[in-house]
Image (cartoon, helix red, strand yellow):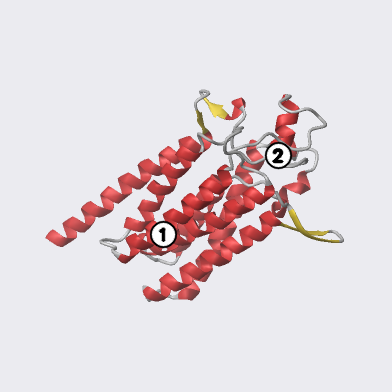
Amino acid sequence: MFREILHIHSFTLTSYGLMQAIAFIAGLVVLNILSKKEKIDKNRMYDMAIWVIMGGVLGGRLWFVIEYFHLYEHDILSIIKVWEGGMVFYGGLIGGILAGIIYLNRNHLDIEEIGDITVPAFALGIFFGRIGCFLNGCCYGKVSHTCGVSFPKNSPAYYEQMSSGAIPHNAVSSLPVIPTQLIESFSCLLIFFILLVLYRFKKFKGIIFYAFFILYGTERFLVDFLRYYSKEAMIFKILSLSQITSLLFIIVGIAMLFSSYKRKRRLNNS
């Protein structure tokens, strides 16, 4: 874990904030390359990217604050300190997608066409973003003595294990936990390359956009079985809220992919 990179007076550059910035820049590079290939106005894409990042930050932070409001009830102003961490990824993803769709609708742009070149940027962004989670020590997995990573004092894993009595107060580090952040990070890198292959052999509009919903939903659903959640956070003591959301992503992705395919066949037969 390496939370702080630079500290000057009241300004602190965190590894989490830096990796989120790198994720955004990497996503913009991908979006720029693919928009050129599709001959789509890159300025429109940059405008959309601003909407997406604003929607993502708002959605991710809002979900986190609602879920962990007890952390902010005595310091309301700290809610705006997003650079210190404290985001729920699915909130950010949903917020970003909704913001992007709103922008596209307002500007009369094709959602499926633009979605096809946007989701590879999302996947690459998640790759870098989850590395930020690992450096920040958040979003860690269950205890594992075979493939785990120990986090130092002051880390979320350390505090949780100390408060639950799993480690003594004078422990040097946490018990080893599964690095689910890195598992998801490299899973999304794989998804990124799969989406690029689909882009190269694209058969109809929307295939890449909806494939992302299916691939990411499946990946997140499976990885969450390895991730640590408190008992209170589990629904019926079986699934996390993120897994329920993942199932919805998969269902929506399959339904829309099938609908888009049927629409293409009708057009070809007409």
Residue that protrudes farthest toward the front in the picture: 146
Give the amino acid at mark 1: Phe
Q: Residue at x 42, y 72 (%)?
A: 35
Residue 143 position (above or below residue 2):
above
Q: Nearer the viewer, residue 169 or 62?
A: 169
Residue 229: numbered disc: none
Q: Quadrant of residue 166?
A: top right
Q: In this rendering, is residue 113 above or below 228?
A: below
Q: How many marks?
A: 2
At 52% from the left and 68% from the top, the residue drawn is 28
Task: Name the N-terminal-most of marks 2 and 1.
Answer: 2
Q: Secondary structure at mark 2?
A: helix
Residue at 68% over, 57% down: 17
Residue beneath disc 1: 193
Relative to 247, 23 lies left or right: right
Say if 234 sits above or below 83 in the image: above
Q: Quadrant of residue 170?
A: top right
In contact (CB < 8 Å): disc 2 and disc 1: no
Q: Quadrant of the C terminus?
A: bottom left
Identify the residue at horizontal 22%, vertical 55% (top origin).
263
Give coordinates of residue 184: x percent, y percent.
52, 47
x and y, in percent, of residue 225 in the image: 50, 34
Determine which residue is flagged by label 2.
Answer: 156
Label 2 packing within 10 angstroms: few (<14), some (14-19), many (20+): some
Under tag 1, what secondary structure? helix
| Amino acid on which disc 2 is placed | Pro
